[in-house]
Amino acid sequence: MIRLEGVEKSFGKVVALSGISFEVPDGQITGLLGPNGAGKTTALRVVYGVLRPDSGRALVDGVDLSLDRLGAQRRLGVFPHAQGLYARLTAREHILYFGRIHGLSGDALRRRADELIGALGMEDIADRRTEGFSQGQRVKVALARAMVHDPRNIVLDEPTNGLDVAATRQVRTLLRQLREQGRCILFSSHVMQEVSALCDHLVVIARGAVVAEGSPDELRRRTGKESLEDALVASIGSEEGLA
C-alpha cells in the first residue's frame, strides 16, 4: 500500500503540492490524473523518494520514506516517464544489472529475467544493445527493469507511451495479472481509454491539491457526465488539457 499524508512541496515561491493526501490500496490499479502542471510529477517523485516533502509524509507498506528511504524503495517498482537506458547494454543485461542492485543473483536472477522477457514479448530484442531501440522497445526494457525484484508496489508513469496496439495489450494484461496477485499499482496516464480500461480508482489533482477521488463510474455519476474525459474536466473546473 502507498499512502501520502498532508504532503506539501514548494520550489521557491511556487507551490507544487498543498497538503495532498491519498491512498493507493493493494489489489487495485489507482489512476493519478490531472492537467499539466497540476503536481502529478512532484507527487510521483515524492513516492519514489527522489523528492523530500516540506511537510507531511509518504509511506510504502507503512515505511516512511523520510525515515527509511532505502527500505521503502525496496518495496517499490518504478517506471518513470524518462526511461534512462544504458545504450551499450542489451535488454537482458539491463534486467540482470538492476536485479543485482536489488540483491538477486545466480540462477534465480536468470530465471526471473527469462520470465520477464517472455511476459513482455521481448525474445527478439533480449540480446540486442538498446542503442537504436524504438520507443516501444525501450518501454518494455524499462518495465522489465522495474519488475525484476518482484515488488509488491508498482508506480508507472505513462507506461504505454509509444507502444503499438499489440504491445499495449501485453502491458494491460501484465497490469491486470499484477492486480489479481494483490499488488498495489499507481498508474499515471493521459489516455482516457487506457484509464477507463485499467483503473479501479482515480485520484484527480489540480493546482497542487486533490480535487476528486473515486471510481470512473463514481466520477461520471458525481459530475453528471457520460464520458470520463468530460467528468475529469468538470472535476478540475477548467478546460486545461489532461496529461
Image (cartoon, rainbow, N blue to C red):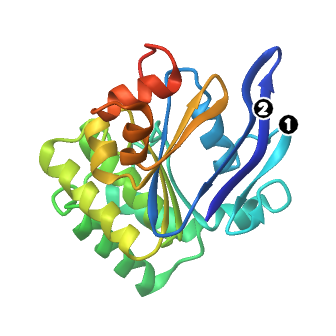
Q: Is residue 13 above or below residue 206?
A: above
Q: How far across and down, in percent of the image, does residue 18 sit?
A: 76, 30
Q: How far across and down, in percent of the image, does residue 138 sit?
A: 32, 44
Secondary structure under badge 2? strand
Query: Residue under circle 1?
Result: 54
What's the residue at 28%, 32% (across, down)? 227
What's the residue at 80%, 50% (across, down)? 57
Front one among 169 and 5 = 5
Front one among 106 and 13 = 13
Q: Which corner quadrant holds the C terminus?
A: top left
| Disc 2: CA contacts within 10 A as few (<14), some (14-19) or many (>=20) | many
Is residue 150 in view from this perspective? yes
Looking at the rendered structure, the kind of residue marked 2 is Lys
Is 165 positioned to the left or the right of 108 in the image?
left
Q: How far across and down, in percent of the image, does residue 106 sit?
A: 46, 84
Looking at the rendered structure, the kind of residue marked 1 is Asp
Q: Which corner quadrant holds the N terminus?
A: bottom right
Q: Earlier in the sequence, mark 2 or mark 1?
A: 2
Query: Residue under circle 2?
Result: 9
Front one among 24 and 151 = 24
Is residue 127 in view from this perspective? no
C-beta proximity under 8 Å, tags 2 and 1: yes
Front one among 128 and 197 = 197
| Disc 1: CA contacts within 10 A as few (<14), some (14-19) or many (>=20) | few
